[in-house]
Amino acid sequence: MILIVSAKLGTASRDKGTAAQGGKGSFISAIPSDIISTVEFNHTGELLATGDKGGRVVIFQREPESKNEPYSQGEYNVYSTFQSHEPEFDYLKSLEIEEKINKIKWLPQQNAAHSLLSTNDKTIKLWKITERDKRPEGYNLKDEEGKLKDLSTVTSLQVPVLKPMDLMVEVTPRRIFANGHTYHVNSISVNSDCETYMSADDLRINLWHLAITDRSFNIVDIKPANMEDLTEVITASEFHPHHCNLFVYSSSKGSLRLCDMRASALCDKHSKLYEEPEDPSNRSFFSEIISSVSDVKFSHSGRYMLTRDYLTVKVWDLNMETKPVETYQVHDYLRSKLCSLYENDCIFDKFECAWNGSDSVIMTGAYNNFFRMFDRNTKRDVTLEASRESSKPRAILKPRRVCVGGKRRKDDISVDSLDFTKKILHTAWHPTENIIAIAATNNLYIFQDKVNSEMH
Amino acid sequence: MGEEEGLHQTQLLDTMFVRGLKRKCFDGEEDIEGTLAGIKAIPSYNLQRQSLLDMSLVKLQLCHMLVEPNLCRSVLIANTVRQIQEEMTQDGTWQMINTQSTGQTSLDRLVSTDILCRSSREQAEGKQVPGYSNFNKDFEDDQTQDSSETMSTASSVQAPRNLQSNVWEMENPQENRGNFQKSLDQIFETLENKSPNSVEDLFSEVDNSYYDLDTMLTGMMSNTKMGHCDGLETFSSPTTTTSNSNCKSDLNELDHIVEILVES
């Protein structure tokens, strides 16, 4: 088995009050916090950013491992909280623009500061996060409180000196990329060239330069001339991790398109089209809906792509367009419940998926606060639950099982008693270590592997 | 092939609707309860399909009235509706259901979608007939094809926008079909806020939705000429990049128009 997760649980609180100074490993907050809408580790895994429905971003930082407790790895504590987006009103359409953060993507760190992109439905913002732990003291013209000194009292000159102060984390908006999208932005992706990034909405994908906010280049446009002919939308997109000219986008019809920006300025013609033919024995009126890809992620190696549709996760080899190389059933027991799930709209839930650092394990969320992990090598899978009851700090997560009739073991959950309001849509995996972040509605769970991970 | 598929689907729907699950599906549908009240056995495939169609239409109407409809969801539901209707057309049940004299059920359904459609119906009054005839022509073309193929082809409306009298029009109450097609049309139209007037002609080369106009206006004001130009590029030639001159002439024309609009 891959990992017996987890040795330690940190349910960090995300209340509004504690701003820059995060507390130490605080647990469930009494103050109701907003529904988490995105989770993302930075490139080293030291920082973890979450965005919520209220337009807020909370960044967690991993504490360095303490020498006193050599067996405990660093916990994640609140590092900074800031309001990224505010609700806006579109006067022309008389519609509100939600402040919900749809995606956060970190930029690779190039100096002491950290930068990230956050986006709501319409506007992308570049934020710079800096630390300040020193303050200049001993000004000539100002006193300690900043008031101007009476010049007659100044008799000698002094050089201001930097004195240490309590750590302060400052977050400033550096760029605002607005007015680029008519439709709702569903994904952003930073290019490996570290200069450009792309943003995708339902019908178009734009390429931006990180330093230029007043223009963007449209690279994909699938809007039909007549909106009544619209039958397919873009659901997710991502740049290739190594090749700065390649990107992929997924559609609501279950297809993936790999595009090469060298081929033409407007990438409406894909270089490769990845599509699996429909299984005629499973066909129903819901076939198209459940084939809609909700997330696409390149593997770290760049050789594979991971897609999530309603019932499965699939691994695609970039070199093979006809079908995925691996398919994993996330919750096939829902196949007989599609009508109910269509009625209560759950069938439209967009689950995300994630690779581990070595691309050997994939993870995705499900209902009832369950999440699933699949080991590509051993072909074993596990279902785990992110809930307060089953996750005491430092407890080992117990695998869960959904029974579909027939033999029912103790602790099994029956399909009919699954809670469809408790959905895990957003999950993230640390870039190198076995640490995962799970967003369960408005709680964030961080699970770490036991120290002795001889499994790999 | 069609028969096999029909059987598979029946089995599938049966599984879906058995075990009390059908209650969850149908409880919210007041117009359906009347139909099923007297039926003790498992509802027929046709009825299940009809109720799925009704449920989908309600969903479309609801999202039509919401503040910010989720385009992906709307498109998926609309595709499902088209798929059902295509199948019903192939079966000939579309015709049957609407000409039955036990039209109580039909009328109930008509009323419910009618009420929901009302606010938007006035808006798109002028578009009713052309849209309707397009839809019919489309089905005529597709009747001979495999249903799996028609899922994608049925959605592309190719007929010119003119009145065509055909067998469908004569035998079926226009209202039901008109309502239905209007629902689909309205979803996307309202999302686009098309204005069917002379302004359309000015922007004939360009997408004539209010929202894109907004984007263009905003773009003009904040000097996003590059993005603006790209937008025009895609409209005039979707697959290749346009030359500078093409872009510039369109821009000049639009410049002029926008100046007038902005100044007024």
Image (spheres, grey):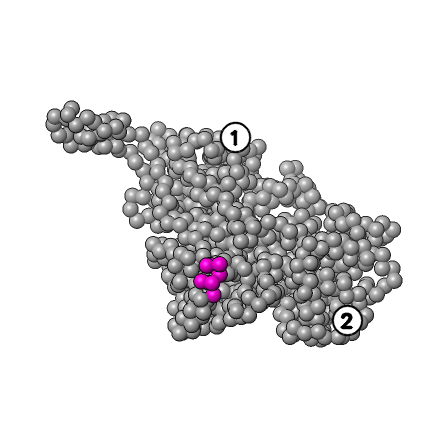
Between residue A145 and residue A7, name the one nearer to us. Answer: A145
Q: Where is residue A41 in the image (x, y as percent from the top left)?
A: 42, 45
Give the CA separation, mark 2 to mark 1. Answer: 61 Å
Residue sitting at x 69%, y 58%: B122
Left or right: residue B45 versus residue B156 is: right
- The extreme top residue here reads A153
- Quarter of the figure with the N terminus of chain B: bottom right
Residue B99, above or below A214: below
- Residue A402 visible in rendering: yes
Residue annotated with mark 1: A31
Report crowding for label 1: few under 14, some 14 to 19, many 20 or more residues within 10 A (C-alpha): few
Residue annotated with mark 2: B168
Question: Does the magenta run of residues contain B260?
Answer: yes
Q: What stretch is highlighted in magenta?
A: B257-264
Left or right: residue B213 versus residue B84 is: left
Q: Position of residue B12 (x, y in %)?
A: 73, 57
Residue type for callout 1: Ile
Assign a secondary structure to mark 1: loop
Residue sitting at x 74%, y 53%: B115
Report crowding for label 2: few under 14, some 14 to 19, many 20 or more residues within 10 A (C-alpha): some
Q: Does the magenta stretch mainly form a helix, a strand or a loop?
A: helix
